[in-house]
Amino acid sequence: MSDSRAGADALDLDLVDGFRFTCRPDCGLCCYAEPRVEPDEATRLLQIAPATSFRRHGRDRFLSSRPEGGACQFLVDGRCGVHAARPHPCREYPVTAHVGPRLQATVILSCPGIDLAPLRSGGVAGALRSTGGLAAEVASLVERVDAGTTARQAAAVRRGRKVERRLTEEGRWIDDDTVRAELGAAMPLPGADLFPPPEPPARDEGLERLPFFFDQRPGPVALARALGGWELLELAPEGGARSLGVLVPPERPPRLDASARRLLEGYLRYVLARDAFLASVHLEMLEGRDGSVRDWVESALLELGAEVLGRASVRAKLAGRDARELTEGDIERGIRATDQDWLDRPTWGDRL
Ligand code: SF4
Ligand code: SF4
């Protein structure tokens, strides 16, 4: 058990402050997942549900979901069957923390219970301090900061230094503060060269690999690459999917009104402020020999922006609207359909 004061001091909460959160009882989006389970949590679960099944990956244990893109084994009629004993990722969602030189908490913006207002006011850390809307989720994170976290942090820092050394030797390294200052001053937005936007995986690569979002249906809607466009699939809790049709993503950037543009820029600034984002770009850079950190971060932001616009357009079409001009609400839905994927990318760091 951690010293909670030390945990609170160790956690950087700049990217959480200011967000309001109200969980939507009709949603269940975060239960289409396999949450990691600590040993003491597994013991507690087995006491109340002896048939609990786990999946192992290396030394980690995960709660199994139902096959074929189904929900967690404990999701029944949209409710958690083990609420009091649910593992930490469920207690903490929609907050997660990256372990690197700092323990940086961030909000998973795919959660429809999160109000995106701080992004509209610039998306910069600490733009709207206070609220405590995520106090219980943050308290659970704080509780888990212990000596083991310190050891994992030291290992992550060593990995990060190795990456930095290699990129420095190749003359490609630029430190995070400089990259953030340069790109944040004039946030790049995707142009026609990035359209049509990057495609999602195909259905036969596994339903659980597809990006998905809450769309006020009983199951989340997943996006899959398909002949002639992107197929939208409504996932079922017990596994399997029902096709909602194939829609064509935009061939060129949709027009944005002023508030839509401001929200997209605010989102990209928020992503740029995440250590996990920069650490994932650094890792990708090892696959190439050219281009500075600034170049790679800029193109990752442009690709992310194009994905948001593509998914916003497809969601607008699904709702029967003209997707050639997008509003702030459309961009919000595009962000929600995209953010979790980018947070799931590997980094040289670790996850608390
Ligand atoms: S995704 Fe967010 S709103 Fe939906 S059930 Fe999970 S925490 Fe609640
Ligand atoms: S344990 Fe409960 S809250 Fe966690 S994923 Fe399963 S059903 Fe959802």
Image: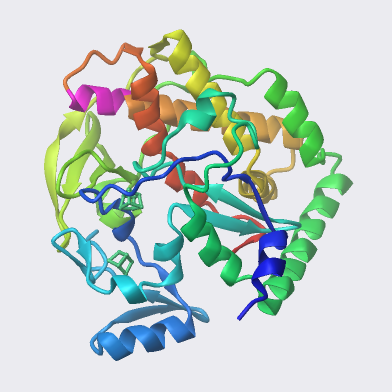
Q: Is residue 24 visible?
A: yes
Where residue 195 sits: x, y (%)?
43, 21
Quarter of the displayed picture in which ligand 2 can be seen: bottom left
Foreground of the two, 33 or 289: 33
Q: Please identify the dominant SS of the magenta region.
A: helix
Where residue 260 sits: x, y (%)?
44, 17
Q: Is residue 311 magenta?
A: no
Where residue 251 sits: x, y (%)?
36, 17
**Horizontally, is 232 left or right of 302 in the view?**
left
Check the image and report above or below for 47 versus 95.
below
**Horizontally, is 50 left or right of 100 in the view?**
left
Residue 339 lies in what quarter of the image? top left
Residue drawn at (82%, 40%) of the image: 175
Q: Residue furthest front?
A: 131
Residue drawn at (42%, 29%) of the image: 308
Q: Quadrant of the N terminus?
A: bottom right
Query: What scheme was used to colour the molecule?
Result: rainbow
Give the residues drawn in magenta, as a range.
313-319
Check the image and report above or below for 207 versus 201.
below
Residue drawn at (19%, 40%) of the image: 216
Residue drawn at (71%, 20%) of the image: 185
Where residue 297 sits: x, y (%)?
66, 34
**Horizontally, is 304 left or right of 174 in the view?**
left
Foreground of the two, 132 or 289: 132
Check the image and report above or below for 156 versus 293.
below
